[in-house]
Amino acid sequence: MHKLDESLLAPLPPFSRLSRTQIREILDAASSHLIPVGTAVFNEGDKADYFYLLLDGTIRVVRITEDGEQVISMHIPAGQLFGIAPALGRDTYPATSMAASELLILRWSTRLWTDFVAKYDGFATETYKTVGQRVGDMNDRIVEMATQHVEQRIACALLRLINQSGVKRADGSIEVGFPVTRQDVSQMTGTTLHTVSRLLSAWEKSGIVSSKRKKITIRQPHQLVVLSGADA
DNA sequence: ACATTAATTATGT
DNA sequence: ACATAATTAATGT
């Protein structure tokens, strides 16, 4: 196995209250894995034998509808736990987790979950905080889907992407930190890739965004906020 | 106001 | 050269 440094976990919320030796214990109980882009870490309905921490990369949480349509329900940025079915009282995963980029993950057996909650101060409260955050975001998205028009939904989706995993460039613009196709954006917003393509082209002409294949860069975040319907 | 269909072009290994 | 991604116009609900 590899030599992972304690400093990897120390700053992350679920572990921030723990001592060096406690973090060492946790690391020794973990196995680390490199997941190629496009690969599923686990699939919806699988027995939840493990829970995970994402050290690097971005997770795409995906569900499949009856007719085989993919729906992207959320993205998870580096530094967060995922696959935490035990925290939800489930023994199977509620959705599929795909690698939106190459991933570096840590993995523990779910048997250890109750130990973690019991032994490590702040672990439970911090993880339930992120779980709460996620359900809140998903509720916002449901409202958004029902009330907003596609242009605003796509604007919101792009804003969420750069808020989570935006990389600031030299000229002040912000680039999405992992590969995103128009298909992907359409699957986050419940539209088609054609509509996304047309809108991105239009926004490119007005200088709001700029995009290459699988790369989207926001040049004027404020204009996107305006388009997202952030008034009331 | 948006999806669907289809044809065409661009881009990355 | 091949597969995947993106654009664009036309037509449909």
Image (cartoon, coloured by chain):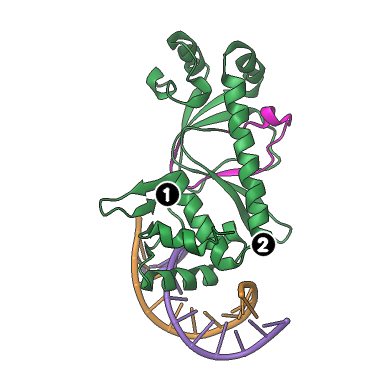
Chain colours: A green, B orange, C purple
What type is the residue that disc 1 sits on? Phe
Q: Quadrant of residue A135?
A: top right
Which residue position is annotated with label 2?
Answer: A147
Residue at image location 49% in from the left, 16% down from the top: A17
Is A152 left or right of A93, judged from the image as shown? left
How many discs appear? 2
Q: Is residue A91 magenta?
A: yes
Label of residue A4 in the image? none
Q: Quadrant of residue A151?
A: bottom right
Q: CA distance from mark 1 to mark 2?
A: 28 Å
Q: Are marks 1 and 2 on the same chain?
A: yes
Picture coordinates of residue A92 (x, y %)? 71, 35
Label 2: few (<14), some (14–19) or many (≥20) C-alpha neighbours in 10 Å: few
Q: Chain of mark 2?
A: A
Q: Give the answer, above or below, for where A188 lies relative to A4.
A: below
Q: Chain of mark 1?
A: A
- Residues A228 and A195: in front is A228
* Magenta extent: A82-104
Is residue A162 visible in the rendered structure shown here? yes
Residue at image location 48% in from the left, 40% down from the top: A77
Label 1: few (<14), some (14–19) or many (≥20) C-alpha neighbours in 10 Å: some
Residue at image location 58% in from the left, 33% down from the top: A130
Pointer 1 or 2: first along the chain: 2
Residue at image location 51% in from the left, 16% down from the top: A26
Which residue position is annotated with label 1?
Answer: A178
What type is the residue that disc 2 sits on? Thr
